[in-house]
Image: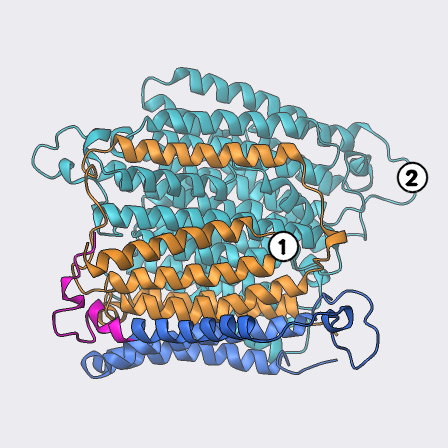
């Protein structure tokens, strides 16, 4: 087992455990902290796949900024134990069933395909994920979507002001 | 391209005017003038090509279909502005921002009509929906509006997440975002051997299913419709009107384009491309949607809620286009976009002026306001698909497109049956207006007496719907010229 | 499976995952240092727990109510605006690396992108969204 493989397995286990803990934590703040650890694990995977830009962005934007927003949202809400609504049992039940169905469908699709049989994650080929190559593509081929994204940002800004600003 | 750029620019202009122009009444004027510019630019592009020469690397393709849909969307937005701008001003203190967001939604709609690339599909859907979350929650003091916005946001972003997951899987399977290249490698130019599920990678099949379900969510096909009644009911009526008309039509065009490209890109039929029994999945979606929409709509006591469910039922009819995937389906979806959007905008324009949103609130409207009652009747008849209104030919084209595919007669029969059911709840409104008397005679059913201009535009809209119903080719003529 | 054999033997450069080995080592040391000091002080330090000591300190005034009060939305407004501009800055990384090769076209694209954000910034300032109101 090479060093890379060991790192891969450690990161995978970390990612899965953190992902599960996000769901199972009773305290929402703990969920957010587990989510941060999940993001770090995934960033590690990105680095192994030579997608360095994604790895950095994932840490700066997601683990840094977005998580702060998550914490703010949690603090905005009134989450004292008395205010917590009771969840109905049948709702949990239907949730489990529908989630399980999706898992079953995806698994059966995976099993029925031939070309993926016996293959495992294929990585370390190509260096499109490097900052330089990604920039070249982003500012030539993907320039139009890139510019259109700014419309998205503008509408988010307007939205933040419309929803968040006190009306006179 | 013109429409995308100009509607984004117009959004920016409205943002600026919200800071620089203090006169509340001026916003409507600016918005209407801007919309006119977009319309002219779009029609100009249809005949003379775009003003802005931009290499999109084939991510956006502006063919006759997409440009014509843009025209429809822009015209419908214009009608919407004319009829309801007064109500928009009443929603809250951010009038200019509401117009800004509507322009951004229009930008998203124009992207969705032209996208040729899954990346653009994602960006278009995002630009289309994010302003809507905000518009839904724009009545900040109203708990219903808050709840609707939160529900819409959570469910909507979840489904967008599914779509992103699907796109990622497809990219993993094919290595491209381009729609015309996502056909499986086996169906290449030489001879195109039959493609079966076995030769497809699971990445592609799984990805395609996820994108499909996510889009089914966006167009509110059952069983992905649960968000819709609460959102449509809770959102301010003016914005429900926009969501139920232009936005819904845009989402359907996006849905159709995704699969039309795949149907055209290869000689094998789509159900083989997807790798699972595609027709069956869509047929189940259609029947569920028609069933849930119609049966629930019959049971409603509130007109706004009834319209929300009827919008699900109408989505069931529009899904026929995605089932049949032929040229007639394309024509049909455009005709449906015109008929359904105009009628919905008209109905909501009247509804948002009512004091009471229940059926009883409409009692005796024909006596106090015969013009509005007449127009409302035409809109309702059009939604029900009664001959001589635009809605009839819209439904006819949908069913005919299914007939054209050959085998699926039973589906057509199901569609006709549910169209008959839908007449029940539309006619109840008409019945209230004409055959029931208002309990409080002297008060009147509307919040305030509508201006004559409003009455004239509403009646004119009703006449347009009848004209389209008599001469449906007058709409489709423009598609081919 | 990842076949990053060069992670240990090949000459590590910036452009391979192997180049991140020093960072991983540093990360392990940083996390290890914090964790070990916490653990060690936990074991070595004396523990004399009493009821008063476990109470939250509030300048001697007995605490009442819950600590978790809903936060004002103005914090969130600033935070979300920060995130938007943070995302904008992210796009400068790939541009900066390719600054020369992209030439004037690239400059124009970035300028357009920044212009959109400047419009947004102007709007935010004019709407007084950044003014801290009580």
User: Is residue B186 within the magenta segment?
Assistant: no
Q: Is B245 situated above or below A96?
A: below
Q: Nearer the viewer, residue B247 or A38?
A: A38
Q: Which mark is residue A132?
A: none
- Across and down, in percent, residue C103 comes to 21, 82
Chain of the residue where label 2 is placed in the rendered structure: B
Q: Secondary structure at mark 2?
A: loop
Q: Which residue is mark 2?
A: B440
* Chain identifier of the residue bearing label 1 in the image: B
Q: In the rendered structure, does residue C4 fall within the stretch colored magenta?
A: yes
Does residue A7 appear to the left or right of C48 in the view shown? left
Chain letter, blue in picture: C
The one of B200 and B379 positioned closer to us in this rendering: B200
| Residue wearing tag 1 | B136
Could you tell me how many numbered marks the image carries? 2
Q: Nearer the viewer, residue A148 or B212?
A: B212
* The magenta segment: C1-22
Q: Position of residue C131 (x, y in %)?
A: 65, 83
Q: Quadrant of residue C77?
A: bottom right
The shade of chain B is cyan
Is B353 situated left or right of B154 in this image? right
- Which quarter of the figure is the N terminus of chain B placed in? bottom left
| Colour of chain A in the image | orange
In the rendered image of this protein, does residue A118 appear above or below residue A56?
Answer: above
Residue C15: x and y, percent? 19, 72
- Sequence-wise, the earlier of marks 1 and 2 is 1
């Amino acid at each position: 087992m090479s060093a890379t493989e060991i790192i891969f397995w450690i990161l995978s286990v970390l990612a899965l455990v953190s992902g599960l803990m996000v769901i199972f934590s009773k305290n929402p703040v703990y969920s957010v902290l587990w989510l941060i650890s999940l993001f770090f694990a995934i960033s590690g995977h990105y680095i192994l796949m030579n997608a360095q830009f994604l790895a950095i962005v994932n840490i700066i934007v997601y683990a840094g900024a977005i998580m702060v927003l998550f914490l703010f949202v949690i603090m905005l809400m009134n989450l004292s134990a008395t205010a917590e609504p009771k969840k109905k049992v049948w709702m949990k039940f239907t949730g489990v069933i529908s989630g399980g169905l999706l898992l079953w469908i995806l698994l059966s699709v995976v099993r029925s395909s031939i070309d993926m049989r016996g293959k495992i994650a294929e990585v370390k080929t190509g260096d499109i994920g490097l900052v330089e190559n990604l920039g070249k593509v982003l500012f030539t081929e993907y320039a139009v979507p890139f510019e259109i994204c700014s419309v998205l940002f503008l509408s988010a800004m307007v939205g933040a002001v419309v929803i968040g600003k006190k009306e006179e | 391209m013109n429409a995308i750029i100009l509607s984004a620019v117009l959004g920016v202009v409205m943002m600026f005017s919200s800071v620089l122009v203090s006169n509340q009444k001026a916003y409507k004027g600016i918005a209407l003038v801007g919309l006119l510019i977009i319309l002219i630019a779009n029609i100009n592009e249809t005949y003379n090509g775009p003003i802005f020469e931009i290499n999109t690397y084939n991510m956006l393709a502006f063919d006759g279909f997409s440009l014509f849909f843009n025209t429809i969307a822009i015209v419908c937005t214009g009608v919407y502005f004319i009829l309801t701008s007064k109500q928009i001003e009443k929603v809250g203190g951010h009038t200019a921002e509401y117009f800004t967001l509507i322009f951004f939604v229009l930008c998203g709609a124009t992207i969705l009509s032209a996208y040729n690339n899954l990346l653009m599909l994602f960006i278009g859907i995002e630009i289309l929906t994010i302003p809507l979350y905000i518009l839904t929650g724009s009545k900040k003091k109203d708990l219903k509006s808050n709840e609707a916005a939160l529900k819409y946001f959570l469910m909507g972003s979840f489904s967008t997440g599914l779509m992103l997951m699907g796109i990622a899987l497809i990219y993993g399977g094919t290595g491209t975002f381009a729609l015309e290249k996502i056909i499986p490698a086996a169906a290449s130019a030489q001879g195109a051997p039959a493609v079966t599920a076995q030769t497809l990678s699971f990445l592609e099949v799984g990805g395609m299913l996820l994108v499909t379900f996510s889009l089914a969510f966006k167009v509110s096909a059952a069983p992905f419709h649960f968000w819709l009644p609460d959102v449509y009911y809770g959102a301010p009526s003016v914005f429900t009107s926009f969501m139920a008309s232009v936005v819904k039509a845009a989402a359907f065009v996006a849905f159709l384009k995704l699969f039309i490209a795949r149907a055209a890109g290869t000689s094998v039929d789509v159900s083989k491309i997807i790798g699972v029994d595609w027709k069956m999945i869509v047929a189940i979606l259609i029947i569920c949607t028609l069933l849930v929409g119609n049966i629930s709509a019959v049971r409603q006591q509130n007109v706004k809620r009834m319209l929300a469910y009827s919008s699900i039922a109408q989505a069931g009819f529009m899904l026929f286009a995605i089932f049949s995937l032929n040229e007639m389906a394309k024509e049909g979806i455009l005709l449906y976009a015109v008929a359904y959007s105009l009628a919905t905008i008209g109905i909501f324009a009247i509804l948002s002026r009512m004091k009471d949103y229940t059926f009883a609130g409409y009692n005796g409207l024909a006596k106090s306001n015969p013009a509005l009652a007449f127009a409302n009747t035409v809109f309702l008849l059009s939604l029900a698909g009664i001959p001589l209104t635009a809605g009839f030919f819209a439904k006819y084209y949908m069913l005919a497109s299914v007939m054209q595919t050959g085998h699926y007669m039973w589906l057509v029969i199901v569609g006709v049956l549910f169209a008959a059911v839908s007449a029940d709840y539309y006619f109840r409104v008409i019945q209230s207006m004409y055959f029931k008397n208002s309990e409080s005679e002297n008060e009147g059913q509307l919040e305030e007496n509508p201006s004559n201009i409003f009455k004239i535009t509403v009646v004119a809209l009703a006449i347009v719907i009848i004209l389209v119903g008599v001469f449906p080719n007058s709409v489709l003529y423009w598609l081919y010229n | 499976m990842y076949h990053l054999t060069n992670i240990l033997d090949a000459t590590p450069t910036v452009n391979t995952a192997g180049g991140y080995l020093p960072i991983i080592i540093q990360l392990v040391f940083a996390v290890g240092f914090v964790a070990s000091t916490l653990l060690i002080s936990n074991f070595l330090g004396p523990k004399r727990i009493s009821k008063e000591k476990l109470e939250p300190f509030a300048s001697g005034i007995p605490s009442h109510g819950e600590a978790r009060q809903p936060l004002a939305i103005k914090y969130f407004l600033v935070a979300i605006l920060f995130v938007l501009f943070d995302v904008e800055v992210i796009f400068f990384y790939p541009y900066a690396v390719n600054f020369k090769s992209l030439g004037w076209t690239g400059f124009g694209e970035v300028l357009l992108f920044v212009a959109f954000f400047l419009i947004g910034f102007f709007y935010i300032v004019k709407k007084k969204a950044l003014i801290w109101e009580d």
